[in-house]
Image (cartoon, rainbow, N blue to C red):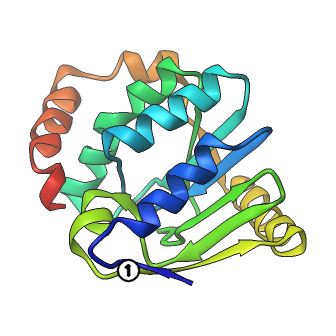
Amino acid sequence: MVRDTDWANIMDVMFSAITTADDYIYITTPYFIPNDEIIMALQIASKSGLDVRLLIPDKSDSWMAKHATNSYLQRLFNANIKVYRYTKGFIHAKTMVVDDVFSTIGTSNLDYRSFNINFEINAVFYNTKVSKELKAIYLDDLENATLIDPEAWGKRSNFEKTKEAYAKLWAPLL
């Protein structure tokens, strides 16, 4: 178990898993409002040839969080990271699976609040069986998701981009 203390333990574990991955990184989170360290680690992993995928909800329980999440997606697309929107309901899972070796599931999102404000707890597994089971669940969830087309994403309206920019201003508080 990893829990938050005065140090950013959960963020450190996730960062370490991302930066030491060899094959793939699969993430599910309802709120993707990452700090610069996490987003840069994901970009480097993808640009190094790893299969990096993010699963986020299509419908959110927070207008502000959804648009703040959207404000980070172009940076992922620029690094060829695949982003999926879960369409079967509001996905609230918070998981990460790396290379069939590492996995974590818990209360923390990939956002400022989880890393710096909220008291969170995650179970961390260095176990092939558990990691493969979580990977299978992730891949099943992708059956109910739509891959976002980066080219179409780039053509969204200026109004949508303005909402994202506004929401991003509030990102540290979301």
Query: Camera-side residue: 158 or 37?
Result: 37
Most extreme residue toward the front is 6
Q: Position of residue 158 (x, y in %)?
A: 18, 21
x 67%, y 43%: residue: 20
The reply, left or right, for residue 12 in relation to residue 52 is: left
The reply, left or right, for residue 72 in relation to residue 94 is: left
Q: Quadrant of residue 45?
A: top right
Q: Position of residue 68 (x, y in %)?
A: 25, 46
Helix, strand or loop under label 1 = loop
The reply, left or right, for residue 105 in relation to residue 135 is: left
Amino acid type of disc 1? Glu
The reply, left or right, for residue 96 in relation to residue 9 is: right
Q: Quadrant of the N terminus?
A: bottom right
Q: Quadrant of the C terminus?
A: bottom left
Q: How many marks?
A: 1
Q: Position of residue 6 (x, y in %)?
A: 26, 74
Q: Is residue 50 above or below residue 174?
A: above
x 48%, y 72%: residue: 92
Neighbor class of circle 1 (other Cα within 10 Å; few <14, some 14-19, many 20+) is: some
Instruction: Quickly name the residue at label 1.
Output: 120
x 88%, y 67%: residue: 128
